[in-house]
Amino acid sequence: MSDSGVRRKSPGGRAKRGFRHNWCCSSMAPASPDDHYHHPSRNLHSNRRQQSRRPKSPSSSRKSGSNPPESPVSSRLGLGFIDRRRILSPGRVSPIESASTGFDLEQEQGSPTAPPVPPPPPPPLPSPSHPPAPPQPVLPPVPSLDAGDALVPPTATGGESSGDASARGCDVRLSLRGKGGQRILMDLHSEVLCSRSSVFAAKISESRAAASGPDSGPRRCWVEVVDVSDVEAYRETIELMYERNVPGRLMKAGVSRCIRMLEVSFSIMFELGVRSCLQYLEAVPWTEEEEEALRNLFTKHKFDKVIAQEVLARLHPQEPPSCQKLTMRLIQSVASGTDDKARRELKSLVQGLLSKSSVYQKDPHDLNKDEIYSMCNSCLQSLTALFLEATNSSPDDRTTKESMPLIARMSLQVDNLTWLLEILIEKQMAEDFVGIWADQSKLLMLYKETSAMVRYEVSRVSACLFLAMGRGRLQSSGAVRCRFVEVWLGPMLVDFGWLQRCSKGLDMKLLEEAIGQTVLTLPLKNQQSLLMCWFECFTKHGNECPNLSKAFQIWWRRSFSKASDIQSGVMYAPC
């Protein structure tokens, strides 16, 4: 027991004498070798006297209450056999061995808690044989453009350090300021900018000349571009300088962004970007908005015709064709067509192109009136020949000689006539057609000899003229108008029932009103003869005839109720 405080056995079996020494301060003299040896009995008695003289703290009394004095653990702890840190560190796999500079036994017995673990020793100083590496230069060399890897410009919003940018070889900081207050900072390579853009080459040289001095070392250039209308397009154009697969990048960007990049490339004289954008735009389709943007761009800037000729060929024809020839060719193609569905679609298309509200047609004189009337006369001749064929041939011959039935061929020619008449009415050129239609005496004679099932198609042309004159869209002389109504009103009264059963888009209510309004534009004497003819026909056929009752009442009032007042006013009018 007495030897327990003096000697400890080392792992090798040899005993170590004495306790470890505590240094109070660095000014103390080193202890002699004899101080490490203490007599066992003296050392034991001195420790016991110190323990009896020192008052016990509450914490130590509580700990002593938890472990009885006769406990072997407490006795071994008090004598220094067991380190306190082994008990206060539960869950540890390996115990903490005693350090080379331990604590004094008296402090260890009186301290309620274990002291903190000392910090790890500092790293060893480098030996003289291995000197430290020299510091890295501030600006490493810029990578060459012929390298295998593409140079990617790092883009920052204002927080990147100069060391990171310099480590990547970026020796130019570009500041883009938009008109709306946006700002983008980009760390770039001067070699890339100078080789791609002559504008940036001049800016970089000016920046370096302004920053040059006798003691100035290598430093980054600062280039600022202000009042940028499209900051994102400017940034994408700068990134395009670093791109090796430029067509693929433009394909991902799309037409709208490519147009904006084309404008930026032109402003900074980035020839590769201008040529690549024009090649991409020439090969892809455009929307109307994109086409308008391209027109505005080519109007604002003058591009080189050598590299922009393919795009300009899509925007502006090299040799403008004759609009009259093209229009007549379209009309003739539609008139000679045989497919009903295709004819309807193409007629609507051509009529929309030739209408006054169309954005494609501005000059009304581009349509040749003589050629349109020539086509109308050709259709009239074909229609007369078909009526002649209908009167001379038998019903069996009407379908064997031609692939189409006779009534279908008549309907085709009537459809051509009505379509051409609508074009003439839209262009206000249909005054002469009224006289031409009123002078078709041969066609009218053949009409009377043909069955109603075949001839009623001709009344569609008369219906088109009645609608135009009754609504005020067609104006002609009184004599021509009177001759037309007297010739074709009778066939219209007969065929009205057939037109009701096969209207083909005709509004029969509007047609009834237009017929009455057209009759009322004639002199009262002519109105009387025409309306009395209608009255007799209506009493026999009823709804098979148009209802002109409203026009009849207006004629009656004008003829009898106000006739005396008008005559007296004319006779006694002051000179």
Image: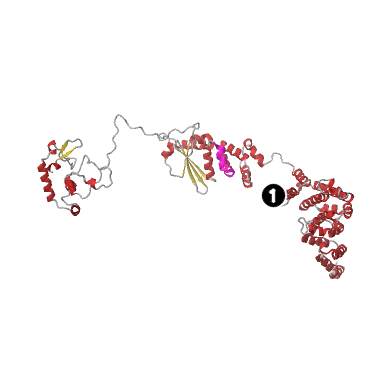
Q: Residues within 10 Å of mark 1 (few under 14, many from 20)?
A: few
In the image, which residues are magenta?
A: 245-259
Left or right for 230, reference 567: left
Whether residue 267 appears in this view of the structure is no
**Secondary structure of residue under mark 1:** loop
Kindly identify which residue carries mark 1: 359
Whether residue 403 appears in this view of the structure is yes
Q: Position of residue 287 (x, y in %)?
A: 63, 46
Q: Where is residue 137 in the image (x, y as percent from the top left)?
A: 40, 34
Q: Quadrant of residue 254?
A: top right
Q: What residue type is labelled 1?
A: Val
Left or right for 427, reference 96: right
Front in this rendered view, residue 556 or 544: 544
Q: Quadrant of the N terminus?
A: top left
Q: Position of residue 263 (x, y in %)?
A: 58, 42
Left or right for 388, reference 209: right
Q: Quadrant of the C terminus?
A: bottom right
Please give the count of numbered marks on the rendered protein. Answer: 1
Q: Is residue 397 magenta?
A: no
Q: Does the magenta stretch include residue 257?
A: yes
Colour scheme employed for the rendering of this structure: secondary structure
Considering only vertical position in the picture, is 170 above or below 507?
A: above
Magenta: main secondary structure equals: helix
Considering only vertical position in the picture, is 216 above or below 467?
A: above
Q: Where is residue 30 in the image (x, y as percent from the top left)?
A: 16, 37
Front in this rendered view, residue 572 or 122: 122
